[in-house]
Amino acid sequence: MKIIDISWPITEGMTAYKDHKVVKIEATKDFERDGVREHKVTLGTHTGTHIDSPAHFLRDGITVDQIPFDRLVGECRVLDLTHIDEKIGAEDLEKFDIQKDEIILLKTKNSFLGPEDAFKYDFIYLDHTGAEFLAAKGIKSIGVDYLGIERNQKGHESHLAFFKKQIPIIEGLRLGALQEERYFLSCLPINLLSLEAAPVRAVVVYR
């Protein structure tokens, strides 16, 4: 059995959405002075690899602690879309024969960007046609390999296509080491109550 970490490493210099840096790590106890190490970490709910719940955009949407575990833990399927240069649409997904209740992870060129690179404003994203196509299939959850699933969509159509069907979105995955195949995914959020999102440690397991 092999385990691959597909999480974004959290550092003060990490890539941040639209360069909105929020991570701060402070030493509150020093080993030389106190004989013990202790730190205070400040970060946002959408830092690095994280899960967006429907409450992010829907007034009465479920919060991140209310997402059923089986939407975030179980067999997943990686789709290789590394040939795409701008956006993923429905026509790019039709060939994959996506089934109801699958967990889908979209691998693009984004996965090969460095974890401390400046934010890439022209990152590859999932447009509303692709989101609506996947949501209509009834998938359990969707994962993408950058810090946002959509780019400059004023109506947030890609988010809403999933949230209206109670489908959580995993953002900020690092999929460069994965092939187009099936894995077992574990991607559980920190148990923050009543919030719209939370950071996760995401790993895949395979034999």
Image: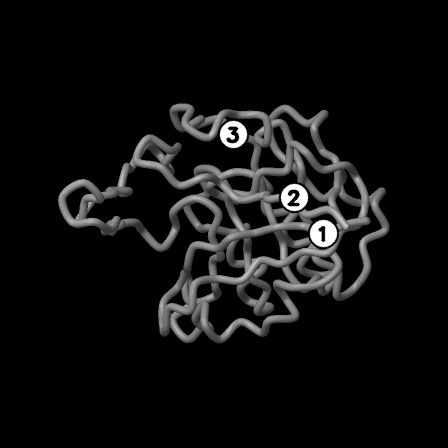
Question: Is residue 197 shown left or right of residue 170?
Answer: left
x, y (%) of residue 117?
Answer: 42, 24
Residue in the picture at 37% in, 68% down: 192
Disc 2 vs disc 3: Cβ atoms closer than 8 Å?
A: no
Q: Is residue 104 left or right of residue 154?
A: right
Q: CA distance from mark 2 to mark 3?
A: 24 Å
Nearest to the observer: residue 158 or residue 47 = 47
- Give the side of residue 199 with respect to residue 169, left or right: left
Q: Residues within 10 Å of mark 2 (few under 14, many from 20)?
A: some
Which residue has dot 3 on it? 123
Q: Amino acid at mark 2?
A: Ile
Q: Is residue 121 above or below residue 95?
A: above
User: From the viewer's perspective, is the residue at label 2 or at label 3 nearer?
Assistant: 2
Residue 166, by quadrant, is bottom right
Amino acid type, label 3: Phe
Residue 76 position in % (x across, y down): 73, 55
Q: In front here: 21 or 100? A: 21
Q: Look at 59% across and 44% down and name the residue there.
A: 5
| Residue 59 rendering spot, x and y as whole percentages | 38, 71
Mark sitting earlier along the chain (3/1): 3
Which of the numbered marks, if any, corresponds to residue 4?
A: 2
Helix or strand or loop: what does disc 1 sit on? strand
At horizontal 79% and vertical 39% (from top left) the residue drawn is 180
Judging by the rendered image, the residue that carries numbered circle 1 is 205
